[in-house]
Structure formats: C-alpha cells, structure tokens
Amino acid sequence: MADNPSGFDPDRILAHKFPETTSTYTERDVALYALGIGACGREAVDADELKYVYNENGQEYIEVLPTFAALFIHKTMGTGLNLPGLSYDPKLLLHGQQYIELYKPLPSRGYLDNKISLAGLHDKGKAAILEIETKSYDKMSGQLLCMNRTTLFLRGAGGFSSSSHPYSYTNYPKNQGSAGKIPKTQPFMVYEDCTRPSQALVYRLSGDYNPLHSDPIVAKIAGFSKPILHGLCTLGFAVRAVIKCVCKGDSSKVKCISGKFLLHVYPGETLVTEMWLEGSRVLYQTKVKERNRAVLSGYVDLHHVASSL
Ligand SMILES: CCCCCCC[C@@H](O)CC(=O)SCCNC(=O)CCNC(=O)[C@H](O)C(C)(C)COP(=O)(O)OP(=O)(O)OC[C@H]1O[C@@H](n2cnc3c(N)ncnc32)[C@H](O)[C@@H]1OP(=O)(O)O
C-alpha cells in the first residue's frame, strides 16, 4: 500500500476517547421526527400513525417510533466528525449503514446519557469506513435504552493502510447488522409511499443539518444532480412500512433494526418496500419506483410475530 500522505492516522483515531454526553428531547421532537419520515403523509388521521404525533390525553402520551433512536448521535456529535487523526472531506461523506438495538420503549421525552465509542475502521481503498457506536441511557434510572451503530462511508479517505493488507478493525460480532440476503421469492408484503419534494427540508429539523440534503451546490460537489434524502429518513420510511404491514401498527414489537444504504434517494421519489418473513425476522428491501433501483436493504427483528400473519 502507498504511504498515506493525507495525515489519516488509524492508531490515533482508535485511541480517541469520546467524552460522555447528555442530551434531551421533548414530545415536539418526537412528533416532528414522525412527520419527517412520512407518518400520516398518506392520511392525516391514519389510525396506525396518528399516535406518533397526537394523543387525545395530551402530548406526553404520544408514542415514539423506534428509528427515533438513531438521532441520538446528532444530539451528541452534531453532523461533523472531528477526531484526531481523521482526515476526510465532509462533503463526500455518505451514510453507509445503520444498526439499532432497542431495549426499552423510548419515552415521549428523554434526558439521556450517551456513551460513544469507535466500533470499526476500515480501509476500502477508495473510501474509509468508520463505525460509531452510541449507547444511550435514561439519566434518571440509569437503564440502557438503546444502542446505535452508525456506519459512515468517507469517499476519498481510503488508502491509509501501512501494509499490503487493507486496514480493518471491528470490535463487535461479525454477523451483527450484516444485511441478510434478499430472497428471490415473491415478497410477503409490499408497501408504497411517496416522499415529498420537501421531505429532506422537514427531516433535517430533527437534527441532521448536513447541507448535502438542502444545498444544490453542495449536492453537486458531492456528485448528485440535486440535494438527496437523508439515509435515516429512507430507513424511517422502510421501518414504518414494516410496522404497518407486519406489526399491525404496534411499534413496541421492534427489537432490532439493520439497514444498508445502497443508493441515494431524491426527495419526491416513491419508495416501495418489499418484505419477507423469516421466523421473527423481517427482511426488507426498499426500491425507488421511478428508477426501479434498490436503495436500502436490511432486516427488522421482532419480539414476536402475530399468529394471524
Ligand atoms: C457524526 C456524524 C453523523 C452523521 C451521519 C449522517 C450523514 C448523513 O447526513 C449523510 C446521508 O444521509 S447520505 C444519504 C444516505 N446514503 C446514501 O445515499 C449512500 C448510498 N450508497 C451508495 O451510494 C453506495 O453504496 C456507496 C457509495 C456507499 C458505495 O458504493 P461503491 O463506491 O460502488 O462501493 P463498492 O465498490 O460497492 O464497495 C466498496 C466497499 O465498500 C463496502 N460498501 C459498499 N457500500 C457500503 C455501504 N452502504 N455501507 C458500508 N460499506 C459499504 C463494500 O462492501 C466494499 O467493501 P469490500 O470490497 O470489502 O466488499
């Protein structure tokens, strides 16, 4: 491998200790997030989804979508990565994968302690892959609520290995979060949903202000014809489809979520999520209808599956 002239130093990156952080959210954040991922987008009073934005007894009783947990990294790190030894162009960063484990239903308002660590670092030649793990605890009870692993694909930042063997570090079980193979059989369920042209502009208000999703010039520099949708917004649409079709609207059934972003989505495109049931695991694949391209695939593990399915 070539010497790394960019100053990218994997040892310094791995040695970095992230400070513990606290973060808060309110019912307003929960409702805004739900709208940002298209809840009630088809029908304002959708019986399965109105509960994420409204409760007749007061906002404190609204429910929290499980993918809301993926936002906690923004509450603690913003949208930038400022690690000693890490050199990359933020305009070329893409969200590669997301893995979420949920241990308790999330309350409608939260005061959290977050412990952040580096879970992986890989040299893919044309890109570096960084995996960041966030464990979020309820500040009052000390209970662990959820764990997130955010995989970032840093285009142009690879080639930092000092030996001929590409650098690869992982500190979690290999099969955890790896995308399952999508079956060749007909899907068990299919759900179609339209994103709005303004989807990313609404979604960003949940904390990811990366200009890739709002600024046409930044999007062009990043290689796209116009601003693209946040990966976590697409994931939110997909998991909402699983909750609606397989969980019959009961989001508390969701235990674990894994998603790999295969291709960008433009706001305004139609998302078609196909689902296959394998025991208590739902394998899914989301396609953009207008381009007939798969943009996301992964799985959702459920606590149990309704016997009527
Ligand atoms: C703290 C701050 C937190 C902030 C986080 C928030 C950031 C957000 O604002 C940013 C976003 O939401 S970006 C939008 C969502 N993401 C996307 O649209 C990316 C879609 N995916 C792609 O374009 C390509 O898969 C692409 C480009 C990712 C890869 O495609 P290729 O370049 O063609 O790569 P390929 O040749 O197929 O593979 C090279 C090696 O990389 C691995 N890989 C591929 N796709 C990956 C992915 N999505 N995630 C992780 N790893 C991936 C491959 O396995 C391959 O490795 P190997 O050679 O070892 O098999």
Image (tube, rainbow, N blue to C red):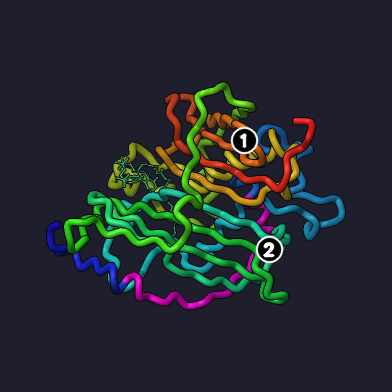
- Under mark 2, the amino acid is Thr
Mark 2 near ligand 1 (CB under 8 Å)?
A: no
Residue range corresponding to the magenta coloring: 13-33
The circle drawn on residue 26 is 2
> Eyeballing the image, is 272 above or below 140?
above
Nearest the viewer among 5 and 265 is: 5
Mark 2 vs mark 1, foreground winner is 1
- Under mark 1, the amino acid is Glu
Residue that lies at the very extreme toward the left in this rendered image: 2
Mark 2 → mark 1, Cα distance in angstroms: 36 Å
Q: Is residue 175 left or right of residue 32?
A: left
Residue 43: percent from the left, percent from the top?
71, 33
Which residue is located at x 65 percent, y 48 percent?
A: 34
Per the image, is 21 magenta? yes
> Eyeballing the image, is 10 above or below 292?
below
Q: Label 1 crowding class (10 Å Cα cut-off): few <14, some 14-19, many 20+?
A: few
Nearest the viewer among 279 and 159 is: 279
Q: Secondary structure at mark 1?
A: strand
- Residues under numbered marks 2 and 1 in contact, where contact means CB atoms less than 8 Å apart: no
Residue 6: percent from the left, percent from the top?
18, 64
Which residue was labeled with disc 1? 278
The image quadrant where one finds the C terminus is top right
Per the image, is 143 magenta? no
